[in-house]
Image: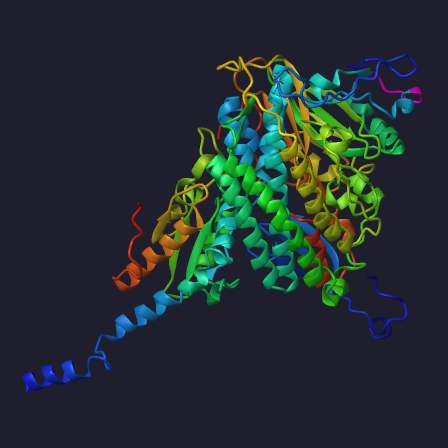
């Protein structure tokens, strides 16, 4: 599997042909293409083992940098995949994971960001990616994360008058 | 006089039947149940399949799905009822004119189905928590034949007689 | 369609009032419980705001209450029309995290059943879409073909709609000769039917008038909303997860990605019909080269605990890119399971794209997006 950054030599694994036995890998691991943008990028990307994790690049940024990350990825032609909230009760933190995919190269990029669990707040990226509006509403529904600057932060999947946040780890109905 | 009446009845039996008007109305209602298109989730697809070419609800008079509750007799609740949706379901039930019946199709409509777990916050556990149900059809989703059997059971409830014999497995 | 400056409407006094039309949760054309609040200016839509959540079934919360094996039947009910592909993503992410080797025969059978499921999903879409546009007959033809697929899959899995056929590490049981012969017969039956559909429906002048240049979606709009599947392939971008992030046995097969550049509803319609033809190609190749062997991996632990970390797996479902993001903390139940569903991203561009449309055109556009509402609400 290819874990090298651009500029270094890497081996190109070939897809394995079908054989009538069980000892064959599940899917071939192709080298990620489209990594040229890393030379211009200011974000702290780390290469990730795609065969294990399912994405190519991972960056951990502060909550104030997520909009800049979105602007940069938008410029490079990435599409918004999804926005996930994760409640780390034990560490007293709330994490938001932004997944992006590139429609032309298939590259998968993850931007993640953690804030304190009381009053979690993130700036909205819906000015850059309008599709983020619904994903952020859903994260607000489930976790109570506020997205400042969001045009319409009302319940999306829960009833209009819901005041509870069900996917928090300390939620009891 | 009585013997003459009985002889008259026997003579014209092939051509004339005598019965109560209620039974005739019930027969008419049973043979032309018009369902409300109320597919909510997965069971809706089996309801569509029951109305399509292979299973053909039209044979039983029930193929005319009405979008408007004002024109429907029977509400086939096919799918999960959500707490957000519950008031809309109740409104639709109230808008249906009498006589009306309800068929709860699928496990979700009977009791909340596979979506009931301790700590659940969004699902109404069965449509009979909102209004009375006449026929329950279990399954996840029930086969179209099961839906047809449910409609035949409803017809039996209306007329007191079953239209077709129960199919015995060989 | 935008009101032109010199149209008759603006020569009269332009209406100063708009009204709100509620395309309510119960509607024959919304394919589920979707509510759209449409602000209308006469017959034209000025703003369409979808309201979701009427079939929210807590799929992501349930994942935190179920073990990996117990959660498997839920995956079929997220998008019940292409249920196999959704189960594939879930078992794929668990196998990826647990580093399980799935036997080749199981991968091939997964591909065959997923492609059969894709064809049956597209047939339901085709029938229901044409029903919305006003034609009742194609629904009956499509469901007749679909029943043949359901017979095949029922013989193997036991279920017609919500299969829970895949298991973590392989399959529930092996396929038999009846399935293989029946699938070959179905492929031979379906190709002339596609030709008949093309002559009966696709080249129909009424359909063309209703779909061509209706519901224009640009590729930049798709990218910024995350739309995938036939929506982005109808706008000129040949993005397909089976080619971009190859998984399972798809690299072994030779198939094309249908892609049209017009970006209108007709392009999305043609993409889906072409995809049925490509699925038939894949099924034929898989049947020809089906390897022998077991269908379940050895040594799948009975109590499955995945290592700490987060994992993703993406598949090409019938409606677009479905991705599962799993966060594990080395327990039997997941810590967080996120389902990235295609219909949510596809519908999110409805508000921007439908401005200024006529109401019937907006409904034709919504039908061409191929929505299944439990996919959005999960």
Residue A130 visible somewhere in the drawing = no
Residue lying at 47% horizontally and 54% vertically, measured from the top left: B50
C142 w.r.t. A92: above or below = below
Q: Is residue C194 a member of the stretch shown in magenta?
A: no
Q: Main secondary structure of the magenta part?
A: loop
**Colour treatment of the image:** rainbow
Choose between A42 and C232: the one closer to the eye: C232
Q: Position of residue B95 (x, y in %)?
A: 46, 62
The quarter of the picture where the N terminus of chain C appears is: bottom right
Residue C247 visible somewhere in the drawing = yes
C356 w.r.t. C119: above or below = below
Q: Is residue A41 a member of the stretch shown in magenta?
A: yes
Left or right of residue C90, residue B68 in this image: left
Left or right of residue B34, residue C375 in this image: right
Q: Position of residue C51 (x, y in %)?
A: 63, 48
Residue lying at 52% horizontally and 16% vertically, measured from the top left: C332
Choose between C180 and C15: the one closer to the eye: C180
Q: How many marks?
A: 0
Left or right of residue B97, residue C169 in this image: right
Choose between A165 and C255: the one closer to the eye: C255
Q: Position of residue C168 (x, y in %)?
A: 55, 22
Residue lying at 49% horizontally and 58% vertically, measured from the top left: B51
Q: Indicate the quadrant where residue C378 lies.
A: top right
Q: Which residues are magenta?
A: A39-45
Choose between A96 and C228: the one closer to the eye: C228
Left or right of residue B62, residue C271 in this image: right
Q: Position of residue C291 (x, y in %)?
A: 62, 25
């Amino acid at each position: 599997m290819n874990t090298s950054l651009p500029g270094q030599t890497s081996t190109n694994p070939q897809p394995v042909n079908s054989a009538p036995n069980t000892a064959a890998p599940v899917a071939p691991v192709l080298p990620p293409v489209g990594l040229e943008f890393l030379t211009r990028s200011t974000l702290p990307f780390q290469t990730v083992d795609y065969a294990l994790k399912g994405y190519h690049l991972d960056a951990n940024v502060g909550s104030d940098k997520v909009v800049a990350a979105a602007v940069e990825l938008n410029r490079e032609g990435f599409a918004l995949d999804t926005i996930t909230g994760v409640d780390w009760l034990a560490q007293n933190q709330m994490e938001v994971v932004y997944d992006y995919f590139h429609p032309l190269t298939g590259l998968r990029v993850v931007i993640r960001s953690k804030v304190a669990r009381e009053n979690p707040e993130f700036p909205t990226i819906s000015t850059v990616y309008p599709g983020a509006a619904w994903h952020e509403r859903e994260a607000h529904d489930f976790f109570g994360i506020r997205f400042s600057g969001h045009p319409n932060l009302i319940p999306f999947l829960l009833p209009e008058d819901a005041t509870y946040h069900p996917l928090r780890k300390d939620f009891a109905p | 006089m009585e013997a003459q009446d009985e002889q008259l009845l026997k003579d014209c039996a092939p051509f004339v039947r005598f019965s109560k008007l209620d039974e005739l109305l019930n027969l008419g209602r049973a043979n032309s149940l018009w369902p409300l298109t109320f597919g909510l989730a997965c069971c809706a697809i089996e309801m569509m399949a029951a109305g399509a070419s292979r299973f053909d609800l039209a044979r039983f008079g029930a193929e005319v799905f009405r979008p408007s509750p004002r024109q429907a007799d029977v509400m086939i609740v096919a799918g999960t009822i959500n707490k957000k949706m519950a008031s809309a379901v109740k409104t639709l039930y109230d808008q249906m004119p009498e006589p009306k019946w309800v068929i709860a199709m699928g496990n979700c409509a009977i009791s909340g189905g596979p979506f009931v777990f301790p700590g659940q916050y969004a699902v109404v556990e069965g449509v009979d928590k909102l209004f009375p149900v006449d026929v329950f059809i279990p399954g996840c989703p029930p086969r179209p034949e099961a839906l047809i059997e449910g409609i035949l059971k409803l017809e039996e409830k209306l007329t007191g007689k079953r239209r077709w014999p129960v199919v015995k497995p060989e | 369609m935008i009101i032109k400056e010199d149209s008759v409407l603006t020569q009269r006094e332009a209406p100063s009032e708009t009204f709100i039309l509620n395309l309510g949760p119960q509607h024959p054309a919304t394919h589920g419980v979707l509510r759209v609040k449409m602000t209308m200016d006469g017959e034209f839509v000025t703003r369409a705001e979808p309201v979701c959540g009427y079939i929210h079934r807590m799929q992501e919360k349930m994942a935190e209450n179920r073990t990996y094996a117990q959660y498997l039947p839920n995956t079929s009910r997220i998008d019940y029309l292409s249920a196999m592909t959704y189960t594939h993503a879930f078992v794929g992410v668990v196998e990826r995290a647990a580093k399980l080797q799935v036997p080749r025969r199981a991968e091939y059978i997964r591909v065959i059943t997923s492609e059969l499921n894709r064809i049956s999903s597209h047939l339901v879409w085709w029938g229901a879409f044409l029903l919305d546009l006003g034609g009742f007959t194609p629904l009956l033809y499509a469901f007749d073909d679909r029943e043949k697929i359901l017979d095949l899959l029922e013989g193997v899995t036991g279920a017609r709609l919500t299969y829970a056929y895949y298991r973590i590490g392989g399959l529930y049981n092996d396929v038999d000769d009846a399935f293989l012969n029946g699938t070959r017969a179905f492929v031979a039956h379906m190709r002339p039917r596609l030709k008949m559909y093309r002559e009966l429906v696709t080249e129909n002048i009424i359909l063309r008038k209703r779909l061509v240049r209706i519901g224009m979606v640009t590729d930049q709009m798709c990218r910024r909303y995350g739309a995938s599947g036939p929506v982005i392939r109808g706008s000129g971008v040949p993005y397909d997860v089976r080619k971009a992030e190859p998984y399972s046995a798809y690299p072994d097969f030779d198939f094309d990605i249908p892609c049209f550049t017009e970006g209108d509803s007709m392009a999305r319609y043609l993409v889906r019909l072409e995809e049925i033809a490509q699925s038939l190609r894949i099924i034929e190749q898989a049947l020809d080269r089906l390897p022998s062997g077991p269908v379940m991996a050895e040594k799948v632990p009975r109590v499955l605990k995945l290592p700490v970390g987060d994992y993703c797996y993406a598949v090409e479902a019938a409606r677009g890119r479905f991705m599962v993001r799993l966060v594990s903390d080395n327990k039997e139940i997941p810590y967080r399971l996120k389902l990235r569903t295609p219909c949510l991203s596809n519908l999110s561009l409805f508000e921007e794209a439908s401005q200024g449309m006529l109401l019937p055109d907006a409904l034709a556009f919504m039908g061409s997006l191929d929505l299944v509402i439990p996919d959005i609400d999960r």
